[in-house]
Every structure is written in C-alpha cells, then in structure tokens.
Image (spheres, rainbow, N blue to C red):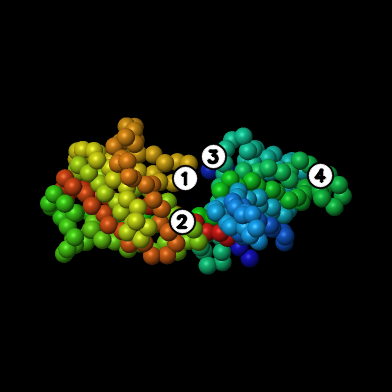
C-alpha cells in the first residue's frame, strides 16, 4: 500500500502512514485516480446524438480516512490534533499531497483541506487520546505531477547553435535537434531558462508544429525564464523585467504532448557560455 503525506505551505510534513508516530491511513481512500471530465457538445436538428467539441478535466476531491493518537497523554494528543488543524488551514494557501509507492516513486498534487476535522466526539469516532475521521482535500488541478525532469543544451563557440558534431559536457546536450519523451498521461508544460549571451531564441516543437520565439539581446550572465505552465505563463529577464512583448506574434506557449516530441532549438548571437535549460513535470491522471 502506498504512503500518503501532506506538506503545508510552510513546508511542514504530516505523514498519514506513519504508524510509529501515531498515524494510520485506513482503507477507503477516494479520488486518487482519474478526475471527472466535462464535454462541450453540439447537437444538430434531425441527427441523432451529438458531436463532442472539447473535453476538459475538472478539479478533483480526495478523501483520506485517517486515525491518529498519542500513547503518552491527553495533552500530547491535543497538541498533535491542534498542530494538524493549524497545518491544514486552507486560508494559508495550497499544500501538497504526496503518494509514494513501495518502489520509492512519488507523485504529487496541489491540495487544500476542505472538510473532515470539524470535531466528532462520538464513542466510535474519538477517545481521550485518539480520533478517526475522513479528511477531504480540494484539488484545483486534476493532474498528479511526477518528478521534475531537466535537460540542458549548450553551444559551440560560434554565432549559432552547432547542429553537427555536438559538444557534450557531463549530462548536457548541445542545441540543435532534440527528442523528448513525455511519459505522462497529458500535456506537460516546460519552463525554459536561457542564459546569455544571445540575441534571439527559437524553440520549436516539430511534433505539434508550434514555435516560441524571443527576440531580445542578452548579455553574458543575463537569464530569461519562459514559463509555459497554465495560469503561470511569464517571460522574465533576471527575475524582474517583463519580456512578454519581445515574443513574436506567432509564438505559442507550447506543451510537450504525451509520447515523443521532436524539438528544434536555435539561438543566435550565442557563445560557449550560452545555455538553454528545459524543466518539466509529467502530468498523470492517477497517483
């Protein structure tokens, strides 16, 4: 059985599967797999059925039946309960639920507490030093996230990225053609970090036909972050300057589709110090 933990916005971790510390995840967890889907559909007069125009996954709800206790005293139990309540306060912001399998692999989902600790002192739900309950978490995103995957490309000493005879240093790859295998169940949205010098950057997903082009002069040490994640899309230079206007009109904050993605990465005005790094988290429909 996997272990499940909650990390609050301040970084405090509660492991609901830690028997030695007085926590147990009971049978009956719900919402760990596929989300609910909604369909936009069109109907036509005289034609049976309907056509599906769009499919979207909705946010989800996860229910975790737990029990916790303190062996030493009522005071210790109350302290643990109050600490949990403080950690679950949804007004502090989103926390993270983590499901870890027996092989050590883990998937996470952003979540905040919505119900379950209102207080039930009935005989079968609580005692002087223990209680049980079903914690319900609201998850705005329907997707579980895998570990962050990062690839870095660099250049030869020339004005463009060298497409042949690549220079490989450590785990890095050289810019030019690249293939990325997204093993997630849905699109993954990369975060690009470009370190100058450079005068223009063109990032193309040949598989989907989309391109992201930035035209802006970067000097040695300048860094631009192009964040393509949904609801977080930004183009920032050195963490402060908005470069959204430097993106071409045809640019798309494209995603990596599930499976193989063939990429073409081009930078002009580059030197051996130029770097392009791509980071993304695969998105899964189940924990």
Rendered location of residue 141, percent (x, y): 56, 48
Residue 102 sits in which quadrant?
Answer: bottom right
Q: Secondary structure beneath disc 3?
A: loop
Say few, some or many: other residues with alpha carbon within 10 Å of mark 4 (under 14 / 14 to 19 / 20 or more). some
> 218 and 146: which one is in front?
218
> What residue sits 16% from the left and 45% below the top?
269
> 104 above or below 62?
below
> What residue sits 30% from the left and 54% below the top?
204
Compare marks 2 and 3 and give the one earlier in the sequence. Answer: 3
Compare marks 4 and 3 and give the one earlier in the sequence. Answer: 3
Alpha carbon separation for disc pair 1 and 3:
23 Å
> 267 and 114: which one is in front?
267
Compare marks 4 and 1 and give the one earlier in the sequence. Answer: 4
Q: Secondary structure beneath disc 2?
A: loop
> 223 and 14: which one is in front?
223
Residue bearing the label numbered 2: 187
Residue bearing the label numbered 1: 230
Residue 10's disc is 3
Residues at badges 1 and 3 in contact (C-beta under 8 Å)? no
Residue bearing the label numbered 4: 120
> What residue sits 26% from the left and 61% below the top?
177
Say few, some or many: other residues with alpha carbon within 10 Å of mark 3 (under 14 / 14 to 19 / 20 or more). few
Compare marks 1 and 2 and give the one earlier in the sequence. Answer: 2
Alpha carbon separation for disc pair 4 and 2:
42 Å
Say few, some or many: other residues with alpha carbon within 10 Å of mark 2 (under 14 / 14 to 19 / 20 or more). some
Alpha carbon separation for disc pair 4 and 1:
39 Å
Q: Secondary structure beneath disc 1?
A: loop
Residue 114's disc is none
Compare marks 1 and 3 and give the one earlier in the sequence. Answer: 3
262 left or right of 134?
left
Say few, some or many: other residues with alpha carbon within 10 Å of mark 1 (under 14 / 14 to 19 / 20 or more). few
């Amino acid at each position: 059985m996997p272990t499940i933990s909650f990390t609050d916005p301040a970084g405090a971790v509660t492991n609901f599967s830690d028997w030695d510390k007085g926590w147990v995840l009971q049978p009956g967890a719900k919402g760990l797999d596929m989300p609910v889907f909604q369909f936009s559909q069109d109907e036509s007069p005289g034609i049976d059925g309907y056509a599906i125009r769009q499919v979207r996954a909705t946010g989800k709800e996860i229910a975790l039946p737990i029990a916790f206790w303190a062996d030493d005293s009522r005071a210790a139990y109350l302290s643990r309960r109050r600490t949990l309540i403080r950690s679950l306060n949804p007004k502090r912001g989103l926390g993270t639920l983590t499901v870890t399998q027996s092989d050590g692999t883990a998937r996470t989902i952003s979540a905040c507490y919505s119900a379950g600790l209102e207080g039930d002192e009935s005989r079968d739900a609580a005692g002087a030093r223990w209680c049980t309950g079903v914690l319900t978490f609201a998850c705005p995103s329907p997707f579980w996230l895998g570990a962050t995957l990062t690839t870095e490309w660099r250049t030869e000493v020339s004005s463009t990225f060298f497409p042949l005879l690549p220079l490989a240093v450590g785990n890095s790859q050289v810019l030019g053609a690249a293939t990325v295998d997204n093993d997630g169940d849905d699109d993954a949205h990369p975060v690009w970090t470009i370190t100058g010098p450079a005068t223009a950057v063109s990032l193309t997903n040949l598989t989907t036909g989309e391109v992201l082009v930035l035209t802006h002069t970067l000097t040695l040490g300048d860094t631009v972050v192009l964040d393509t994640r949904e609801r977080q899309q930004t183009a920032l230079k050195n963490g402060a300057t908005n470069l959204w206007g430097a993106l071409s009109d045809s640019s798309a904050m494209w995603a990596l589709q599930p499976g193989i993605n063939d990429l073409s990465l081009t930078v002009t005005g580059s030197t051996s110090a130029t770097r392009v790094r791509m980071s993304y988290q695969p998105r899964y429909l189940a924990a």
